[in-house]
Amino acid sequence: MITDANIREYLLGRLDADSELVESIDEQTLTDPEFSISVDIIEDEIIEEYLEGSLNSEDMRAIERHFLRPPERQRKLKTARLFRRYFEAEVPKQPAPARLLFRVFRIGQVLLSFRTCAEIAASAMFIISTLVLWNQRRELDIAIKQMNQQLGQERERLAVANRQLQNALHSFQPAIAMLNLVRPGRQRGDMEIPEVKVNPGTKTLHVELALSSGTPRKYRVELRHAEGTVWSRDDVDVTAVSGGAILRVDIPAEVLPQGRCELALMASGEEPISYLFSISKLQSALDPAPSRLSEPALSPSY
Amino acid sequence: MSPMDIQPSPGKQRSLTQEGFASFLLWLSPDPGQAAREYLDISKTLMKFFVRKGSAHAEELTDRTLDRVVGIVHDKPNKYSTPISLCYGVARKIWLEDLRKAKPEPLEDDNFPAPIQPEDDFTERELQCLKHCLDQLPLRHRELITKYHQFQGRQKIEARKNLAQIYGGLNKLRITACRIRARLHDCIDSCAQRSAMN
């Protein structure tokens, strides 16, 4: 079994070159990258111990005669020495304040040098500034949180007030919407057709239609939308007036569709008469009235 | 990298033909780029092997090994399937042959003075290169290697114990530090060579 101690002996050239152990280590260093890293680590540690001077005389001899024979190892030793010098030299340049104070008092100096005082003062200022900033940041966060809470409460109050207003407005909305239709016939093109607005509070659409003929008869009235009949009533009377007659009919609001509609009057022996109009259903009394001619939506440009 | 960028050392071209070398690269991989990378990897691994054996001429032994492997592959291309196994076998043979060469008698140990270690045998340029190479490291690695090497004796042991807790155990720490050192070593070498040329 290969151990760190075996590898160390291998690197120091103290194992029998023909032994199975050496053969095994040879093979693994070539074929197993992870094993190779383990060998590198032990190499580095040998160099470190050599520089520290913590090796016994036998190990020292093995290193100088065998381990350091390759020029590549000598370069590695040189680099290790360079590291050692650099990292040890770096320590005094960045002392932590606590370490600096400890060193000062350990030496027993009573009077601190100007540089030391300046460094301590700078460190203290830095710590105080950090604490102040941190505290201010904390207070700011608390203030923002409070404001957000207030904002949320305001929004809720606004929503409640809006609902109350809606309810109040509903109670003021007329229950009956009025529509007068005087011109029968299908109109094509851009001619405007009458429009009636229906609120949520509307219960009935009261329609009065003008007829040219004053002959009293009963009509079947159909409300048509999108090629279908949504409501109808039979035997609707007309009222004679000078110049013609008026047909009055009440349509329940719940059957009214949104958009273009046709009111058709049919009587026996007569051609059916159609009146076109449009229904605009409002969501609430606060909604703006939609325009009669709707424009196609513009596609966004990028 | 194309196979043509990798040429055997000029001295070896007497015994190593281009044809043999080309068929060796093809044996490593049908993809020329991949073959080039594998050749460099094998070369580096063999160098390391001979250095670890304590050889003073690792580069020469590596060339000799590759020379012989190229010849074997050229003669019997289908006999060996794993390049590193073949290289291992040949490398070991080369090493043993080198070991058995006649060596001069060693001097008497008793009166042989121990070599004096030069204290500061590096230049200001190398120090600058080390600083530059440290700056190239990610901050976490820079901090690790600095703290790993900062102290001596008892403090060193304590510092490394603390580092081991941060970096996932002593083994992981040793591996990471070793890799960082290797990276720094290569960087300093390149930096020093560049500075010398300038």
Image (cartoon, grey):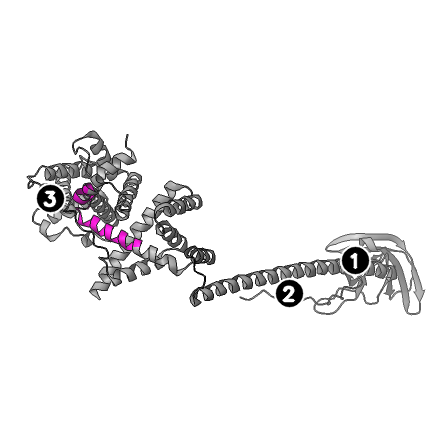
Where residue A62 appears, as percent x and y from the top left, is: 19, 41
Residue at mark 3 to residue at mark 2: CA–CA distance: 107 Å
| Mark 3 neighbour density, 10 Å: few (under 14) some (14–19) many (20 or more) | few
Q: Nearer the viewer, mark 3 or mark 1?
A: 3
Judge whether A202 appears above or below B73 on screen.
Answer: below
Residue at mark 3 to residue at mark 1: CA–CA distance: 104 Å
Where residue B164 appears, as percent x and y from the top left, is: 41, 44
The image's mark for residue B111 is: 3
Q: Earlier in the sequence, mark 2 or mark 1?
A: 1
| Mark 2 neighbour density, 10 Å: few (under 14) some (14–19) many (20 or more) | few
Q: Which residue is mark 2?
A: A296
The magenta segment is A61-84
Instruction: Say whether residue A155 is left or right of residue A2.
Output: right
Residue at mark 2 to residue at mark 1: CA–CA distance: 35 Å
Q: Nearer the viewer, residue A93 or A77?
A: A93
Q: Classify mark 2: helix, strand or loop.
A: loop
Q: Chain of mark 3?
A: B
Q: Which residue is mark 1?
A: A160
